[in-house]
Amino acid sequence: MSRAQLLTASILTGALLLAGGCASHPPAPQQASAHSPCNRLAPAKPAPGEIDQRRTPLYHYAICYPQLGADAGKLMPALRGWADRQRDAFLKIADQPRPQPWTYELLIDFRVVARGEGFVSVLARGYAYTGGAHGMPLLAGFTLAGDRLVRHPDVLFTEPQQARAALSAYVRKILGKRAAGGDTAWCFKDKNWLRRGSAPDAMNYAIATFIGAKGYVSGLRIYFTPYQIAPYACGMQTADVPATVFRRWLKPGYRTLFAEPDG
């Protein structure tokens, strides 16, 4: 290629980049590459099935969607709807001119955390940074159980309050052991903070996914956002609760998913 051709190609490339940066609507999702921007949270295996991303001088965002296969038709609309709301809220702030030198950032990573016969659980994790010491954590759970979308574990139970009380009692035993010793014991020095964040309130137990074992659901994984039960530096906390703790309150439509495999 001649120098004139190289110069023409460079000018065209620059014009395309500028046009893309000035677009008023997010670009079409791109096929994921092995080097996903969401690997900043943790390496993904398998790689995301799709990535929606955009970069401008003011901000950049990336939303990584999982490979769902046959479940995509029922579950993907819920993931996209939630991600769109987070992105739109972020852009209302990030798309405005400002004197600050730093770039705002949104990162959302959807990953399949449990899968079996009749169910799939996806965890959304990420942050939105619009200034300050650190970003605002983003966390959400999505489970497709049969043909029903489970966004809050309360919908699994005939008596949600009683089930939450059982979940809370079990979770506090787990957290109590962490507070008793080990490298993270300092996270739980404030016992009032821990008790408030793990109390059997619907909001405290709003984020959960299934735990899969041998194709069946063996329990629930409860997620606590940073600041909920401990300082931000302690990060997200989780607690695994076996189905035996809450099985008596499961609705009939969910009991078969939590059944133990024969043999």
Image: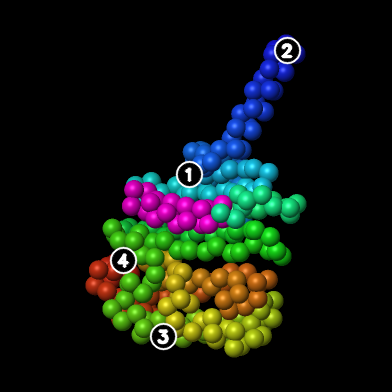
Tell me, for residue 4, which label it has, or none. 2
Q: Which residue is mark 4?
A: 257
Drawn side of residue 33 relative to residue 114, left or right: right
Drawn side of residue 245 relative to residue 7, left or right: left
Estimate the spatial distance between the alpha carbons at disc 4 and disc 2, rounded to whole Å.
66 Å
Secondary structure type for disc 1: loop
What amino acid is at disc 2? Ala
Q: Which residue is mark 1?
A: 49
Which badge, 3 or 4, comes first in the chain's sequence? 3
Disc 4 versus disc 1: nearer the observer: 1
Residues packed near mark 1 inside 10 Å, few (<14), some (14 to 19) or many (20 plus)? some
Q: Which residues are magenta?
A: 72-91
Whether residues under marks 3 and 4 lie with C-beta atoms below 8 angstroms apart, the answer is no
Disc 2 versus disc 3: nearer the observer: 2
| Location of residue 250 by image quarter | bottom left
What amino acid is at disc 1? Gly
Which badge, 1 or 3, comes first in the chain's sequence? 1
Which badge, 2 or 3, comes first in the chain's sequence? 2
Residue found farthest to the left: 252
| Location of residue 21 by image quarter | top right
Q: Can the viewer see residue 27 in this picture?
A: yes
Q: Which residue is mark 3?
A: 165
Residue 66, relative to residue 141: is it above or below? above
| Location of residue 188 by image quarter | bottom right
Drawn side of residue 152 relative to residue 249, left or right: right
Whether residues under marks 1 and 3 lie with C-beta atoms below 8 angstroms apart, the answer is no
Secondary structure type for disc 2: helix
Secondary structure type for disc 3: helix
Secondary structure type for disc 4: loop
Residues packed near mark 2 inside 10 Å, few (<14), some (14 to 19) or many (20 plus)? few
Q: Residue at x 73, y 53 (%)?
A: 99
Which badge, 4 or 2, comes first in the chain's sequence? 2
